[in-house]
Amino acid sequence: MIIVMQRGASKKEIGDVMREIEGMGYRTHPIYGVERTVIGAIGDERGKARLQKFETSPGVERVIPILKPYKLAGRELRKEKTGIAVGGNAVFGTGTVPVIAGPCSVESLEQVCSTAEAVKAAGATLLRGGAYKPRTSPYAFQGLEEEGLKMLAEARTRTGLPVVTELMKESVLDLVVAYTDVIQIGARNMQNFDLLKAVGQVQKPVLLKRGLASTINEWLMSAEYIMAQGNMNVILCERGIRTFETATRNTLDLSAVPVLKHETHLPVVVDPSHGTGHWEYVEDMALAAIVGGADGLMIEVHPNPHEAWSDGSQSLTFERFATLMQKARRVAEAVGRKV
Ligand code: PEP
Ligand code: MN
C-alpha cells in the first residue's frame, strides 16, 4: 500500500502514521518530496488489520493499493502460465486448445452418448452436459440431476471423454465431484461466495464462468475465492456479458482474453454458444477466440437442436460441429497452436 500524505502534512502527522503502520507489523518506506510525503507500507496484508483505515487519519490524502487484490490468481506473484490437465488427454493453458463439447442439458442416455461419440470423432477432448440447470423460469426443465450425472458417467465410460458438468448448490457437491472431471460454476453463481469456497476445498479443476454482468476484476476475485481455499485448478470461461445489444443473446467479450493473459496465469476458455445465442454465429466466434489466444473452447452440440430441451437455438448439429473442428484445426495451425 502507498499512503499519500496531504500537502503540508505536519511532521507529527507523518510520524504518527508511520508509527501506527509499523505497529501493525509492516515496514515503512517514506519518500519525502518537496510538496508532499508518500509512505510505502511493505508486508503481506493477509491476516492483518486493513491499511485502508489510514484514509481517515489526520494529514492523509489517499491510500493506494499496489498489489492487485487477486494475489493468487494474478501474475504479480506467479509469472509462468498454469497448465491444468484433465483426464489424461487434455491440458488447458499450455498452447493447445482443448474443445469441450456436448449438449446444454443431459436429456437421455441415448442423447448424451450419441453426442459424446460424435464430438469425440470430430476431435473434441471433453464432454459437457448439464444435469443441474440454472433456468430463468422455474417452469422450465431443471435437469435430470443424479440420473443425468449417471448418464454422463456412462458416456465417459463408452468414449473415454472426461466430463464437465455444472454444480449449483453445495448440498450436491460430493455427488457431482464423484461423477465429474471438471466442476462448472455457471455465470449465475460466479459470485455465490459460499459455493466458491466449497469448490475451493476439493481438488477437482473448476471451470468458472464469467457472471452475466461481471467485470474482469470481479471475475478474478471469484477465482481468488476458490484459490484461497487451496484449489489452484481454476479455468476461466468467457461466455458473454449483458450489454444493450439484443442481436445476440450476450456480447462475447473476446477482448477479455488478452486482458486476462496480462492479468492472470490461469487458462481462459471461450464459450461462443452462450456468448452469441445463435448457432449461425458460433463457428466464427470460435475461430476468432482461437486467434485471440483462448486456451480452449466450450461448444454446445445436440443430435437434433430443434428438439433440444434447452438452448437449441445455439446448439450445433453433429455435422456443423465437425465442420467447425476442421476449420479450428487449420486456424490453430496458422497461429502456431493445436486444437
Ligand atoms: C451452460 O453452460 O449451459 C450454462 C448455463 O452456462 P452459463 O452459466 O454461462 O449461462
Ligand atoms: Mn446452455
Image (spheres, grey):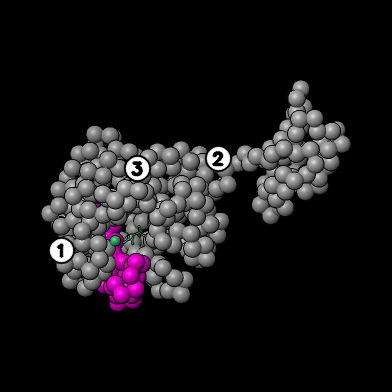
Q: Is residue 208 left or right of residue 311?
A: right
Secondary structure, magenta segment, majority class? loop
- State the quadrant of the C terminus: top left
Q: Nearer the viewer, mark 2 or mark 1?
A: 1
Residue 29, placed above or below residue 178: above
**141, 166: nearer the viewer:** 141
Is residue 157 at all visible to an observer of this figure? no
List the residue tagged with mark 1: 306
Which residue is found at the position 68% from the left and 41% from the top?
63
List the residue tagged with mark 3: 254
Give amino acid for label 1: His
Give amino acid for label 2: Glu
Q: Position of residue 55 (x, y in %)?
A: 72, 44
List the single residue furthest toward the bottom: 147
Res 76 label: 2
Which residue is found at the position 20% from the left and 66% from the top?
308
